[in-house]
Structures are given as structure tokens and as C-alpha cells.
Amino acid sequence: MRTAIDTTVLSALWSGEKTAETVKRFLDTAAEQGGLVICPVVYAELRAFPGATAAFVDKFMDDTGILADWNFDRAMWRLAAERYERYAIRKREQQMGEPKRVIADFLVGAHAVLRADVLLTLDPRPYRRDFAELALHP
């Protein structure tokens, strides 16, 4: 089983948040069950983590066996665009103003749908709503 990892998971681990120990267990379990993968958007967001460098992020990925899936094909972009469009329409119809979420969340979700079996995230709400077919952990 291939597990895609959201930025929230690794940033919680790196910052030593109170969820860090739980996150480590989730990652260990997911690694035992199959491969761990991040999409290029998550890689870019990780590079923006305070104090993170390319060398730090790359070494962490090598040490943990997390692979980066660098290929975003047409199907992935179209799925992300479709779900972002639905989100924007829903926000406007509910008279909640203009969309606030950024396209990055939709790219992470589309990647997980098309290239993984499950998404490991600490913020499952938007993915449940916009990618109902996506298996989420926890």
C-alpha cells in the first residue's frame, strides 16, 4: 500500500509538536505497509520549513525512504483543477466569498488519488470534502 504524505505530517514531526510521536508511529506503520511518497508541492513546502535546506530535506527523505514523485501529468492537473473549481463554486453559492484555499491543497489531493492508496494528513477535513474517494489516515 502506497502512502502519500501531506506537509502537515512532516512539519509536525520536525517542529516537535505534541503530535510528533503519533506522527512517527503513523509513518513507521505506513512504511511497513508499503512505500511512502510525497508530491513536488509537498517537497516545495518542506523546503520553506524554518531552517530546512535542500540538503536537510533530501537527507531526511533518504533516511526515511520517502520518495518524491516528480511527475505531474495532465490527469493530475485536470483532477486538481476540477476539484478546485467545485470548491470555488461551492464557496460562491454558499455566499462565503471568494475561495481562500490555495491550489497546492488540490494538487496534493489529486496526487494522492492518482498515485497512492492513502493520504496521511493531520488536516483531513478539506480532503474528505473535496476528495471523497480518497482514503485518509488517520
Image (spheres, helix red, strand yellow):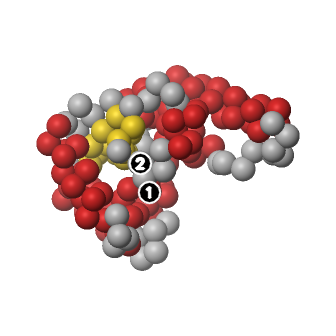
Q: CA distance from mark 2 to mark 1?
A: 6 Å
Three-letter amino acid code at the position of disc 2: Thr
Depth check, front residue: 21 or 44: 21
Mark sitting on residue 67: none
**Horizontal side of residue 66 vs 85, given as left or right:** left
Q: Which residue is mark 1?
A: 8
Q: Quadrant of the N terminus?
A: top left
Place residue 119 in its image quadrant: top left
Could you tell me which residue is drawn at 66 percent across and 48 percent down?
101
**Horizontal side of residue 100 vs 23, given as left or right:** right
Pointer 2 or 1: first along the chain:
1
Could you tell me which residue is drawn at 46 percent across and 68 percent down?
49
Q: Position of residue 136 (x, y in %)?
A: 39, 37
Q: Are marks 2 and 1 in contact (CB under 8 Å)?
A: yes
Whether residue 72 is visible: no
Whether residue 52 is visible: yes
Neighbor class of circle 1 (other Cα within 10 Å; few <14, some 14-19, many 20+) is: some
Place residue 70 in its image quadrant: top left
Q: Position of residue 46 (x, y in %)?
A: 43, 60
Q: Position of residue 125 (x, y in %)?
A: 53, 43
Could you tell me which residue is drawn at 72 percent across and 50 percent down?
100
Q: Is residue 111 above or below residue 10?
A: above
- Number of numbered callouts drawn: 2
Q: Which residue is mark 2?
A: 121
Could you tell me which residue is drawn at 44 percent across and 29 percent down?
134
**Horizontal side of residue 37 vs 95, given as left or right:** left
**Horizontal side of residue 101 vs 57, given as left or right:** right
Three-letter amino acid code at the position of disc 1: Thr
